[in-house]
Amino acid sequence: MQESREVCCQFCKMEEIYENTNFKRSSVNKSSYCKGNATVLQERDTTPSIPSKGTKVLLMVLCASLVLAVGSLCVLGVLFEYNLSQLDYNKCVDFGSLTMKHNMVSMQLSIQEINNTCMERECHELNAKFDRLKSYFNDGQSCNLSVDGWTVCRGLLYFSAEKHNWSKSRDVCVSKGADLVTITSQNEQDFLVSKIKETHWIGLNDLETEGRWVWVNNQTLEETGVEFWFGSGQKEPDNWKVQDPSGENCASLGDRNGNLHTWFDGSCKQQKKFICENKY
Ligand SMILES: [Ca+2]
Ligand SMILES: [Ca+2]
């Protein structure tokens, strides 16, 4: 009997423990059980029991959490879709920009190729001109005998085949668009000397003022700074008047004695070959 009472008390404690659970309290008649009828324990009641207040609160919290989770997932989904569309848009923009840059670079490359072609053509033409000028200035081969007997050097100097007095010689030069040659440098003197085999009239005279020698372009010897008289001015010009009382007022390169490297004054009436020069 004492043992049955102890079982009854333990059962009552368990009831208190499981009060907030879904387990259903047995419909055992506790009083009768406790009163000693310990042999009869009824099966659990199969009818649903009313949830306790704590359970309701827990369920409400769980539901709220679930709603929040679903809402968060929806928001995340929307954001992901938006970012994905933005990414696609940026890709499209980048692709368009790259395509434009590619077209620009292609166009610049085409222009550069055209420029290179033009530069190559210009370079070829300049080289051809350089070769012509090089052969034109470098040697005596640039002097050619023309059909009328003149020797033309560098396209600027004309060595006559016929002989005239000084004035007539100058007239012939002028008729060719040139004038009698002026000599204003050692190189020019040397070049002319190398091309003649007899005396030639040059464009130097003192017709206007005796002793004041000027070139046909009115330059004086002081202005040009060079002069190549025979005997370094001691012998020529001497204005010799034996053959011509008017004296010697015209200059020639070389004399009849074969001195071809210096200048001589002589009578302007003498018949000599002459050198014309086209300055232009
Ligand atoms: Ca003179
Ligand atoms: Ca003389």
Image (cartoon, rainbow, N blue to C red):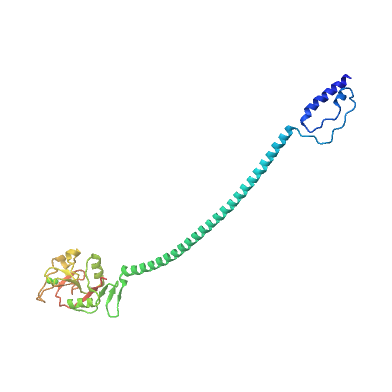
Which is more toward the observer, 147 or 179?
Answer: 179
Q: Residue 190 in the image: state x and y as whole percent.
A: 24, 67
Which is more toward the observer, 165 or 25?
Answer: 25
Q: Residue 49 in the image: state x and y as whole percent.
A: 80, 34
Quadrant occupied by the C terminus = bottom left
Q: Residue at x 73, y 32 (%)?
A: 53
Query: Looking at the picture, does residue 81 appear above or below residue 213?
Result: above
Task: Locate residue 189: give its quadrant.
Answer: bottom left
Q: Residue 108 in the image: state x and y as whole percent.
A: 47, 61
- In the picture as drawn, the residue positioned furthest to the bottom comes out as 148
Q: Is residue 184 left or right of residue 2?
A: left
Which is more toward the observer, 222 or 62?
Answer: 62
Number of numbered markers: 0
Q: Residue at x 24, y 67 (%)?
A: 188
Q: Residue at x 14, y 66 (%)?
A: 233
Q: Is residue 30 left or right of residue 130?
A: right
Task: Locate residue 279: give its quadrant.
Answer: bottom left
Which is more toward the observer, 273 or 97?
Answer: 97
Residue 197 in view in this figure: no
- In the picture as drawn, the residue positioned furthest to the top comes out as 2
Ligand 2 quarter of the rendering: bottom left
Residue 121 in view in this figure: yes
Quadrant occupied by the N terminus = top right
Query: Looking at the picture, does residue 9 appear above or below residue 83?
Result: above
Q: Is residue 161 left or right of residue 5?
A: left
